[in-house]
Structure formats: C-alpha cells, structure tokens
Image (cartoon, grey):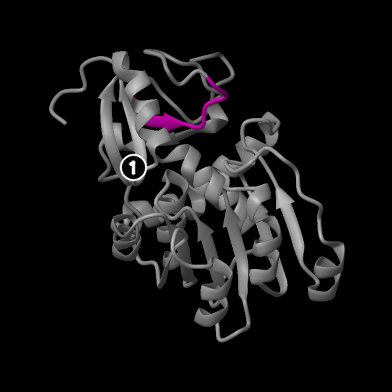
Amino acid sequence: MGDSTRDWKVGDRVCALLTGGGYAEQVAAPWDQVLPVPRGVDVLQAAALPEAACTVFSNLSMRAQLQAGMTLLIQGGGSGIGTFAIQWAKAIGVTVLCTAGSEEKLNRCAALGADTLINYRDSDFSEQSSLATGGKGVDRILDIVGADYLERNLRCLALDGHLVIIGNTGSRVDRPLPLGLLMSKRLSVSATTLRARPRAQKAAIVKAVRENVWPLIEAGRIVPVVDSVLPMPKAADAHRLLAEGRTVGKVLLLNGDHGPL
C-alpha cells in the first residue's frame, strides 16, 4: 500500500476497478477504486463484479436515472454486463426486457428475473418491445451493439426515453442520428466508456456502487454469473469462447493456485 492509501489494510479481501492490466499475478489500483469482496462471495467470483457493477450503475442510475416503475430494454441479456443489469434492475423495481440470440440464453435471463424475452434472431426487438409495453415503448435502453441498432433503439423508446450506448459490437460504420425522431419524442442518447474516465469520476462511481449495489449483493439479490473459469495460459481459448457468443455471464482467467473451484 502507498503512503496515501486510506480505508484499507494488508490482508483485506478486495476486488478493484482496474485502470488496465488485469492479466497479471499482481496489479496496482488506486485505493479509491478498490472494493471489499462482498460477504458470501468467493474471491474468485468477486473478480466478475467491479467492472460490471460500475458500468451498469454509472450508466443506468447515475446517468440515465433509471428508477422503480420504469421499463428497461437490455440488448445482450446473456453478456456479463447484461446478466448483472437484469438482476440490479429487478432489485430496484424495474420491468426488464432483454434480447439474446438463443433460447438457452433467454432461459438463463428469465431465471435472473427478466420479464420479457426477445430472440433477436427470429423476431424484431422493436416490435416485441412495443407489444410488451402496450405501444408505449420502453423508458430506457442499455445497448452494447451500437450503430447497427441506433434507429431501431430510438423507435423503441417511450416519450422522454433515454438510450445508453456502452459498446459498438455491430458494424464500425457510423449511422446518421435521426434528429427529427429525437426531437419529436424528446429522447436523449449517451455513449460512454468506463476505462477512459478520469480517476475522480471512477472513484465517485466506485463509492456509489459500494453504497448502493454492494448491499444487494450481500443480501443475495444479485449474484455473480460466471460461465467459465480458465487458467491464464488458456487466455486465447477464453477469448474464443467470447467470440463464439455462446457464453452466459463472465469468463474468468485464473492465475495461480486458487484451490478447489
């Protein structure tokens, strides 16, 4: 620990929102980006929590002001972010719609609490969202696809809705922003990445997550969803698993002897 470190002591069980360099036996992290391993959570599973929790809470709560009684559409409900977002949104009283590319993934999303399940391979998520909300549209959307879904996402939104874009896994071709649609429905769009934020912002997010999200984890209302755990020498295999799109939740890399898994 550095001389300016506060709140922590040697021997504490911790996880952290890193600035990078997670593929390591040891890593340095700013003290105010460190979190305690939640009570009842294994230290290995805790590795699945900080980035997902900080991404979801900073975007949906701090930025999009998602609240109880609202509706949320999660694009990619089976992802590490998606599985966390479903649980957190349900824990605060939100109605959740989610998309995924297989019935297996949708079943897992349902088990986590999702209310409406949409297979994007065989149905139009905008039409299904409209049906599920009685034509009103959803209040908020969390999207990891990006440009390819831009206009359809906006059409899914209710009046005064908000679209949060946290990824661009679709095409890398930009799409024009339909200003007429934005203005007529009073919509707003935000696009963010977590890694590029300055330290002060990350520290504020971590503090808010510890205060608002960690109690839900310790109460068992949110659980880490881990698809696979691979040893560090098989990192390339882990990336292939993610690229194949068949995983549900996080893929973790294990470095060193953790004991029985």
- Residue at (53% x, 44% y) in the render: 54
| Image side of residue 203 versus residue 227, left or right | right
Observer able to see residue 254: yes
Main secondary structure of the magenta stretch:
loop
> Going by the image, does 240 lie left or right of 153?
left
Residue that badge 1 annotates? 247
Q: Which region of the structure is painted magenta? A: 11-20
Picture quadrant of residue 257: top left
| Front-most of residues 33 and 108 | 108
Q: Position of residue 204 (x, y in %)?
A: 63, 42
Q: Is residue 240 left or right of residue 177?
A: left
Q: Position of residue 72 (x, y in %)?
A: 54, 67
Residue 13 appears in the picture as rendered = no
Residue at 34% x, 32% y: name it.
241
Location of residue 118 by image quarter: bottom left
Pick out the residue farthest to the front. Answer: 122
Residue 130 on image: x %, y %: 57, 78
Position of residue 32 in the picture relative to residue 157 (left or right): left
- Element type at marker 1? loop
Q: Please check the rendered image and state whether residue 19 is part of the magenta-colored stretch, yes or no.
A: yes
